[in-house]
Image (cartoon, rainbow, N blue to C red):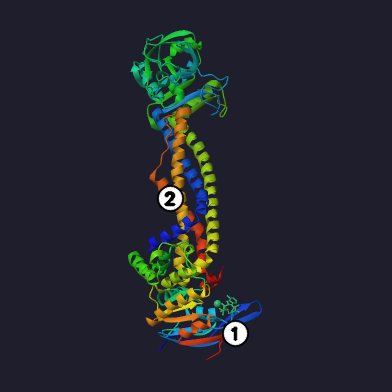
């Protein structure tokens, strides 16, 4: 029975194809926007979480500068972090290791081609190594890693070994000229997950200081605590000691201390707000789409007044007419939703592809939880039916005699 | 025995201050198997009376008895059920649903009675064959001539096998030859035992009738 009504509703929509498509346009643009925004947002959140998971929840990073005004190490700030701070932090209880890491844009020649890329200086002492490795997700793909006692050797990131940076692929035993000094590649790395890190070169910290002529400065200190539960307490303690040491008041810090959790939270909050705003805008477009359906259905009721009269004359009950019109508007919503979801999934996939191609993060994936698909579909059906409610009620209440007289 | 009777039925329309009595105390009885013709000048209340007989409308006062049940105070949804089961309508302007094929148009009243698709299709095809349209099942109304459309309408009126066929000027939009053809169908139906009530302006057609009512100003003249 209901199947017959659906067929009938479908016939009616097909008869007014152009109008039906235009009406659905309003719904599917909104649904496509919502689906792609949520799926990308979810994917981005997952990516952020994954990044911070590799970082580990038991780590604290300290960088120079005030506030989260830019990527670490980029700020033009007079404040410096030096070995003195490392020594200061090491004295605090509950800490497993304190690791200084340096990085800078470097001039790199390979096969007579010049490129600028990040060069990292990492400590090689046994106790620091595991922290560095897990911290930056370093895994050797070919050759070996740099060891204590190595001097003029480096590890080349994934991007160099695949030919993304230089025209020629960088292989183990190739020679690089970094800041006019000769180095040999002893190992190439697996992908770290983002283009910036994958195009980096890693060398021993001491050598880095020599190459860049920076005997003192430290780009970033990574602290690993003994017990993950105390991360925030220890972060506070570090803040307090460094402030005292520098003679600064609270709130005047010229350095940043972030636990991985805080870092993740900051990202998530900012990101959540942006996403909420975007989805809000998309939701408005859905409301507009709903009004579009209502408008179409009112027009349809008016146009088909006579038809309604005929159907009533041949035995259609008010509830039959109501069902018929509700089904029509519901179908408009549902089909619009289906197209919207398909479109939204497509948009997300394209955005992910573009992100991989141009920003180079293989981490960003779009995620489509079943609840999103089912939810979007239900939502579009509800919008369609709700928008059609008033016109359908109006249609069902028409008096048969009046409707039949209508021309 | 009367299967349908109107007792002192009034239908009054108020337009602003003015009152129009489309029906002014009409009494009439329809017996099973009757072929009743209603005639009268334009505006005399023929269509209004037909709507009352066909349970499309309820009177301002008076009673409409269908098989001894007073339907004049029923809700629209109850009237719809009665119409669907007991009345078949044929209109002057055919009134087929333009988006549906001939077959689907004939199926429609059965669909509202929740008759299964298979049975509906079979019966609709049979009825269309009976009115000589076996070759036009998949034509839409705008692909049919006026006479053919009216025959589809006759098949549709018969689809739920109603007791009473109500036809308001069924030949009004047809040329005289096609009109005679349509009347032949109605006469055949009457012979098979259907009760037929028809409005017409054509004196010729009264010869088929068992009874003729003349209407004027909402009243029956020849009681
Ligand atoms: N819905 C309505 N509102 C107001 N007046 C109406 C309405 N329906 C009918 N009337 C009036 O009632 C009177 C009878 O109308 P009705 O349609 O029954 O006439 P008719 O005999 O069928 O005429 P025709 O031969 O032209 O079809 C007319 O004066 C008409 O104007
Ligand atoms: Mg009339």
**Which residue is located at x 63 percent, y 81 percent?**
B19
Q: Is residue A77 above or below residue B103?
A: above
Which chain does the numbered disc 1 sit on? B
Residue at label 1?
Answer: B217
Indicate which quadrant contains ligand 1.
bottom right
Q: Which of pointers 2 and 1 indicates the residue nearer the eye?
A: 1
In this rendered view, identify the residue nearer to me: A118 or A69.
Answer: A118
Task: State whether residue B65 appears in this view.
Answer: yes
Q: What secondary structure is found at the residue carrying circle 2?
A: helix
Q: Are marks 2 and 1 on the same chain?
A: no
| A197 over B139 or under it: above or below | above
Q: Secondary structure at mark 1?
A: loop
From mark 2 to mark 1, how far is it between C-alphas? 58 Å
Q: Residue B124's quadrant in the figure?
A: bottom left
Q: Decide if ligand 1 comes within 8 Å of the CB at mark 2.
A: no
Residue A377: mark in rendering: 2
Residue A56 picture location, percent across and down: 39, 29
Numbered label attached to residue B116: none
């Amino acid at each position: 029975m209901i199947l017959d009504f659906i067929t009938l509703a479908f016939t009616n929509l097909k008869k007014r194809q152009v109008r039906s498509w235009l009406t659905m346009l309003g719904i599917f643009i909104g649904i496509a926007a919502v689906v792609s925004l949520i799926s990308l947002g979810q994917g981005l959140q997952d990516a952020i979480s994954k990044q911070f998971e590799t970082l580990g929840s038991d780590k604290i990073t300290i960088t120079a500068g005030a506030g989260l005004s830019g990527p670490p190490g980029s700020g033009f700030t007079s404040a410096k972090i030096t070995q003195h701070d490392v020594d200061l932090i090491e004295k605090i209880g509950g800490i497993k290791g304190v690791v200084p890491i340096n990085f800078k844009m470097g001039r790199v020649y390979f096969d007579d081609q010049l490129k600028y890329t990040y060069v990292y200086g990492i400590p090689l002492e046994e106790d620091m190594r595991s922290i560095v490795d897990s911290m930056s997700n370093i895994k050797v793909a070919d050759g070996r890693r740099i060891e204590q006692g190595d001097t003029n050797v480096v590890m080349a990131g994934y991007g160099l070994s695949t030919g993304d940076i230089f025209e020629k692929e960088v292989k183990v035993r190739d020679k690089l000229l970094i800041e006019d000094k000769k180095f040999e590649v002893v190992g190439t790395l697996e992908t770290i997950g983002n283009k910036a890190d994958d195009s980096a070169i890693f060398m021993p910290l001491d050598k880095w200081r020599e190459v860049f002529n920076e005997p003192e400065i430290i780009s970033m200190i990574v602290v690993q605590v003994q017990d993950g539960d105390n991360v925030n307490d220890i972060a506070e303690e570090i803040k307090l000691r460094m402030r005292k040491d520098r003679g600064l008041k609270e709130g005047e810090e010229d350095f940043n201390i972030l636990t991985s959790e805080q870092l993740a939270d900051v990202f998530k909050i900012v990101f959540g707000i942006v996403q909420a705003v975007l989805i809000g805008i998309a939701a408005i477009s859905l409301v507009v789409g709903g009004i579009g359906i209502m408008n179409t259905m009112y027009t349809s009721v008016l146009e088909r007044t006579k038809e309604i009269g005929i159907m009533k004359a041949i035995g259609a009950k008010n509830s039959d007419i109501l069902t018929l019109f509700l089904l029509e508007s519901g179908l408009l919503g549902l089909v619009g939703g289906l197209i919207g979801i398909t479109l939204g999934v497509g948009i997300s996939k394209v955005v992910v592809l573009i992100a991989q191609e141009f920003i180079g993060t293989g981490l960003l994936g779009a995620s489509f939880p079943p609840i999103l698909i089912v939810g979007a579909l239900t939502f579009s059906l509800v919008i369609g039916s709700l928008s059609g409610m008033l016109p359908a009620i109006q249609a069902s209440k028409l008096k048969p005699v009046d409707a039949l007289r209508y021309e | 025995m009367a299967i349908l009777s109107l007792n002192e039925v009034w239908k009054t329309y108020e337009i602003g201050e003015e009152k129009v009595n489309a029906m002014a105390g009409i009494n009439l009885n329809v017996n099973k198997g009757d072929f009743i013709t209603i005639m009268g000048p334009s505006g005399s209340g023929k269509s209004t009376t037909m709507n009352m007989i066909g349970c499309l409308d309820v009177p301002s006062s008076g009673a409409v008895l269908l098989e001894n049940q007073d339907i004049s105070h029923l809700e629209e949804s109850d009237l719809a059920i009665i119409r669907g089961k007991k009345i078949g309508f044929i209109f002057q302007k055919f009134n087929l649903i333009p988006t549906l094929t001939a077959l689907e148009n004939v199926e429609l009243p059965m669909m509202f009675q929740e008759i299964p698709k298979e049975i509906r299709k079979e019966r609709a095809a049979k009825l269309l064959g009976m009115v000589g349209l076996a070759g036009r099942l998949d034509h839409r109304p705008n692909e049919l001539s006026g006479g053919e459309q009216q025959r589809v309408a006759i098949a549709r009126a018969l689809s739920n096998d109603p007791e009473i066929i109500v036809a308001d000027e069924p030949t009004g939009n047809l040329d005289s030859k096609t009109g005679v053809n349509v009347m032949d169908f109605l006469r055949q139906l009457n012979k098979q035992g259907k009760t037929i009530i028809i409005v017409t302006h054509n004196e010729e057609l009264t010869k088929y009738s068992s009874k003729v009512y003349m209407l004027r100003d909402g009243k029956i003249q020849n009681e």
